Amino acid sequence: MPNLRISEAAALLGVSDDTLRRWIDQGRLESVVLDNGRKGVSGTELAAFAQKMTEVTEPGVTVAASARNRMKGIVTRVIKDGVMAQVDMQAGPFRITSLMSRESADELGLEVGSVAVASIKSTHVVVEIPEA
C-alpha cells in the first residue's frame, strides 16, 4: 500500500500541512515513518480518515462553475464484479463515485489508498492516475 508525504496527504484532504500534523499529534490520524525517515501517512489510513470527514461536509454556495473539472484525490473504496467496478474517491471535502469497466479499474491498478484524478464532464467521471 502506498505511503504519502504529509504535504501530499494534506493536499488530498484540502487542508494545510500544519492542520494534518496537528491531527496526527491529536491522535486523529496515525503516521508512519517513510523511507527517507520523515513522517508520512499510510494511503489506507488516509482513505479511511477521508471517508469520516464527509459526514459533516456542507457543499457551500456556487458562484461560478466550469463545464469540466479535474479533482485529485485518494481512492477510498473499490467494488468489482465480473464486468463493472465502482470506485469511490475523496478529493478534499468532496466524495466522488465513478462507475467504470472492471478492465479499466484493473489497468489503472486502482485500490484503496491510490492517488487518482477524477475528470468530471457532465454526468460522467473519468479516473486517471497522476504523474508521480
Image: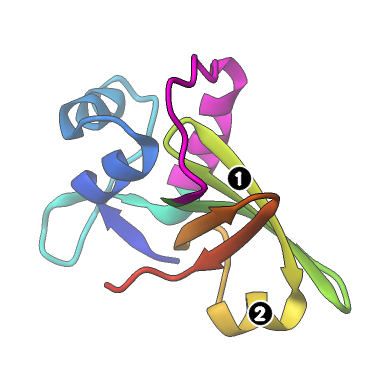
**Callout 1 secondary element:** strand
- The residues tagged by marks 2 and 1 sit, at their Cα atoms, a distance apart of 17 Å
**Callout 2 secondary element:** helix
N-term-proximal mark, 2 vs 1: 1
Q: Is residue 56 something that shows in the picture?
A: yes
Which sits in the foreground, 117 or 18?
117
Task: Indicate the amino acid at tag 1.
Answer: Ile
To which residue does mark 1 refer? 96
Picture coordinates of residue 29 (x, y %)?
38, 33
Q: Is residue 61 above or below residue 2?
A: above
- Please give the name of the residue rendered at 65% of the width and 50% of the height, measured from the top-left corner: 122
The quarter of the picture where residue 26 lies is top left
Q: Are marks 2 and 1 in contact (CB under 8 Å)?
A: no
Task: Indicate the amino acid at tag 2.
Answer: Ser
Picture coordinates of residue 19 (x, y %)?
23, 25
Q: Which residues are magenta?
A: 46-69
Residue 48 appears left or right of 103: left
Q: Is residue 113 something that shows in the picture?
A: no
Quadrant (top left/top right/bottom left/bottom right) for the C terminus: bottom left
- Please give the name of the residue rendered at 55% of the width and 77% of the height, measured from the top-left corner: 109
Q: Residues within 10 Å of mark 2 (few under 14, many from 20)?
A: few
* In magenta segment, residue 57: yes
Which numbered circle lies on residue 121?
A: none
Residue 128 appears left or right of 99: left
To which residue does mark 2 refer? 104
The quarter of the picture where residue 37 lies is bottom left
Picture coordinates of residue 78 (x, y %)?
68, 60
